[in-house]
């Protein structure tokens, strides 16, 4: 029978999140009911809430989640009741050409809304296919990844988005080589995970730019060889000819265009930030074409959950991915509005919403 839970609902663009009771549908055979323990506040959640990404409301947002399995559908075999799990963002079908060629994030079934949530008989959008700012969520079996006992659920939640995106950009998209020079524009949750990936992969130098001095300090502590203001002259003082790999993690036109300029001849630019829909970037064709630079797009790091999550959990357990350093605050579900404001103000790196107790 359907179950109820508390969830933070955004009724329309610019509206504050309000915690209300919702109803969840009966489980289908391939679905899993997860009790959400923690969900990180990602900037894309706030951008959706503010009407900058999508015009789909009312919605329950939250996509960087981990929790404990409550129930499983009749055909589910990979997880059982009581298992600790992280939620993957692929929600893929598993049998289309994208899934079978290792690109599940491009699966055409991924953006479909599962239609599993209601409030007062009104359907709710399950944001990013997860709706993690709720005590209970329903996802397909393939979106649940078991979490080892030596990995806290808060760190596992970050793996679901910020870490998968950042490290995936380094290893799955750009394929950064050992000893390569790297520039990173933006030191938020994704940018710092790009940094961690580059450090694990042995890049050198790793130059991180961010206007916030606290984020620059954290980047330095996490392995950046240089931390600077986001200014082209400062980048050129370190490497006049540019960088082999440049990662843009800010989601604005200016750093995207700067990233392209900073790549050396034959260099690779990876654009990760999620800008508003009307943002366009300009490229000087006569300069770009003979340079043989590459521009790559990155959505969630082309994550392959069954391959990548386990690797990231092992790196965390060995002390190679200090994800706890990225968590700069924890709040209860009823204070989620204040957490959204922290993200808007670019204060801290990741605020974690503690939704239930593990």
Image: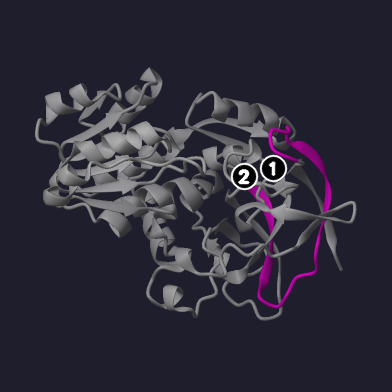
Q: Which residue is drawn at 64% across and 76% down?
A: 76
SS at mark 1 in the image: loop
Most foreground residue, 160 or 286: 286
Q: Quadrant of residue 34?
A: bottom right
Q: What stretch is highlighted in magenta?
A: 12-37
Q: Position of residue 28 (x, y in %)?
A: 73, 74
Q: Which residue lies furthest to the right in this view?
A: 120
Q: Can residue 228 be seen in this view?
A: yes
Most foreground residue, 328 or 357: 328
Q: Residue at x 37, y 47 (%)?
A: 166
Q: In which quarter of the image is residue 48?
A: top right
Residue bearing the label numbered 2: 38
Q: Position of residue 61 (x, y in %)?
A: 66, 46
Q: Which residue is drawn at 38% across and 71% down?
A: 102
Mark 1 neighbour class, 10 Å CA radius: few under 14, some 14 to 19, many 20 or more: many
Mark 2 neighbour class, 10 Å CA radius: few under 14, some 14 to 19, many 20 or more: many
Residue 25 lies in the magenta-colored region: yes
The label on residue 355 is 1
In the rendered image of this protein, does residue 35 appear above or below residue 213?
below
Circles 2 and 1 in contact, beta carbons < 8 Å: yes
In the rendered image of this protein, does residue 6 appear above or below residue 219?
below
SS at mark 2 in the image: strand
């Amino acid at each position: 029978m359907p179950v109820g839970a508390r969830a933070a609902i955004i009724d329309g663009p610019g509206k504050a999140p309000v915690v209300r009771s919702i109803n969840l549908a009966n489980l289908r055979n391939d679905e899993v009911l997860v009790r959400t323990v923690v969900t990180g506040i990602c900037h894309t959640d706030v951008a959706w809430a503010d009407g900058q990404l999508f015009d789909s409301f009312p919605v329950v947002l939250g996509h960087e989640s981990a929790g404990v399995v409550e129930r499983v559908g009749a055909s589910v075999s990979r997880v059982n009741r009581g298992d600790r799990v992280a939620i993957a963002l692929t929600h893929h079908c598993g049998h289309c050409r994208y899934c079978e060629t290792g690109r599940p994030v491009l699966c055409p079934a991924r953006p479909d809304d599962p239609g599993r949530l209601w409030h007062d008989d009104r359907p709710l959008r399950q944001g990013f296919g997860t709706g993690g700012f709720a005590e209970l969520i329903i996802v397909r079996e393939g979106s649940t990844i078991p979490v080892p006992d030596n990995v806290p659920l808060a760190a596992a939640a970050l793996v679901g988005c910020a870490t998968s995106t950042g490290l995936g950009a380094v290893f799955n998209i750009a394929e950064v080589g050992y000893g390569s020079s790297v520039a990173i524009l933006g030191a938020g949750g994704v940018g710092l995970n790009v940094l961690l990936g580059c450090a694990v992969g042995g890049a050198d130098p790793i130059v991180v730019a961010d206007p916030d001095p606290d984020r620059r300090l954290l980047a330095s502590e996490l392995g950046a060889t240089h931390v600077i203001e986001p200014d082209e002259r400062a980048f050129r003082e370190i490497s006049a000819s540019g960088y082999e790999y440049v990662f843009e993690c800010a989601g604005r036109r200016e750093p995207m265009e700067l990233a392209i300029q900073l790549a050396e001849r034959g260099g690779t630019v990876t654009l990760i930030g999620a800008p508003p829909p009307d943002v366009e970037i300009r490229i000087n064709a006569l300069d770009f074409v003979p340079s043989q630079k590459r521009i790559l797009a990155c959505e969630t790091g082309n994550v392959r959950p069954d391959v990548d999550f386990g690797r990231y959990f092992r790196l965390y357990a060995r002390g190679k991915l200090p994800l706890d350093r990225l968590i700069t605050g924890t709040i209860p579900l009823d204070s989620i509005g204040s957490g959204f404001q922290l993200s808007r103000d670019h204060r801290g790196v990741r605020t974690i919403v503690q939704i239930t107790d593990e």
